[in-house]
Image (spheres, rainbow, N blue to C red):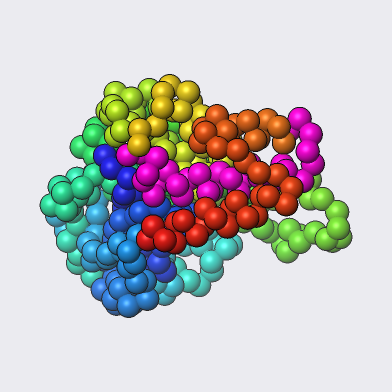
Amino acid sequence: MDDVTVVADIGARYGMHPSWNGFDAKMRYIAFEPDEEEAERLRLNVISTETMQYEVLTTALDRFEGGRDFHLLKHRGLSSCLKPDLTSECFRHLKPGQAEIEKVIKIKVRRLDDVMDEQGVVPDFLKVDTEGTEQDVVEGAEKLFECGVLGVRASCNFQPCFIGQRLFSEQHDYLLARDFVLLNLDYRGYGFPRLGLFRKPDPMENEDFRYGILVHADGVWVRKLSSIDKLYSGDARAFARLKLAYFCMLNNAPDYGVDIARETRAAGEFSPAVKSSRLYQALRLHMARFLGRWRTVPDDQWEKAAHLYRSIFDQELQGGSGFYPQVNAMMQALREAA
């Protein structure tokens, strides 16, 4: 375990997932996109930098190695190894006319365990969006879960859109059994709208009801800290926890991210190697921006935020007119380090 964050993005059509926007540490992003035309487009449009290595593998993944039928749908982004259920809530109401099968091709599928073994790397985070086969992909990573995956962001369904699709209950139980907890569902409380009644009549009024039927959302799971501590020690443990803290910050759980960093620092000093890493410095900047939001009102809440920052990074978080110069200096330091 070092300070390079490794992400395996399975189902990478359209490019890097937006949840990674704002990640300023070192990254190796491995995108899996079996559609060769889309894979080539990704290679041309996403350029690696000194701090971010982006690579695309035209590999389809499953829980076993072999062959499967791949259904190319009218909307290519909905293509799947499963047949679409045109009577489902998804395709009947939200995406009518987009799920017709235009072509069926034979593809080779592999296990993520085997591909990552060939790459010589254990991904820190998995993002899985494969139009109905997400749990099959996750079960093909059984060995990886035993030795180091820290977090999973996966599309999950509460009702099937595809014939034979496995649902959220299986995904959740599988990850719970591997020392993960559900961090959140990336869901605003609304299903697929009916009859056009989802638009607020008065845009100035708060919307205090939900609508439609809940069909799917992205689920985000994270490894328990006690489980991380069984896998790693020393600097490797600190890097793993800081990576997870950063992941939480980027996935709508900044309070948990701050708490992970606080607890890790409380357990002991960060070593010089950790403090000099880009991961540490980038997370420090990200948390300064988050905790600095309370500076506008210098009350007890701001004192608490400033204390948290100081207790983690041994540095004063400036308020008032000192905040932006401090943040700009940290940003400049990151640019120079690159």
* Residue 283 point in image, percent of width and height: 48, 45
Q: Residue at x 16, y 49 (%)?
A: 120
- Tell me which residue sits at (13%, 52%) in the image: 118
Please name whichever residue, 249 or 89, is drawn nearer the observer in this view of the structure: 249
Task: Check the picture and name the quadrant holding the C terminus.
Answer: bottom left
Image position of 49 (left or right of 167): left
The secondary structure that dominates the magenta segment is helix
**Residue 150 at x, y = what percent?**
36, 38
Residue 325: which quarter of the image? bottom right
Residue at horizontal 35%, vertical 54%?
A: 26
- Asked whether 51 or 133 is in front, the reply is 51
Q: On screen, 93 above or below 184?
A: below
Magenta span of residues: 273-301
Task: Give residue 27's position: percent from left, percent from top.
Answer: 34, 55
Question: At which x and y percent is residue 233?
Answer: 28, 27
State yes or no: residue 208 in magenta: no
Residue at figure coordinates x 41%, y 23% from the top left: 268
Which residue is nearer to you in this view: 140 or 166? Answer: 140
Residue 200 visible in the shown view:
yes
Is 274 one of the magenta-colored residues? Answer: yes
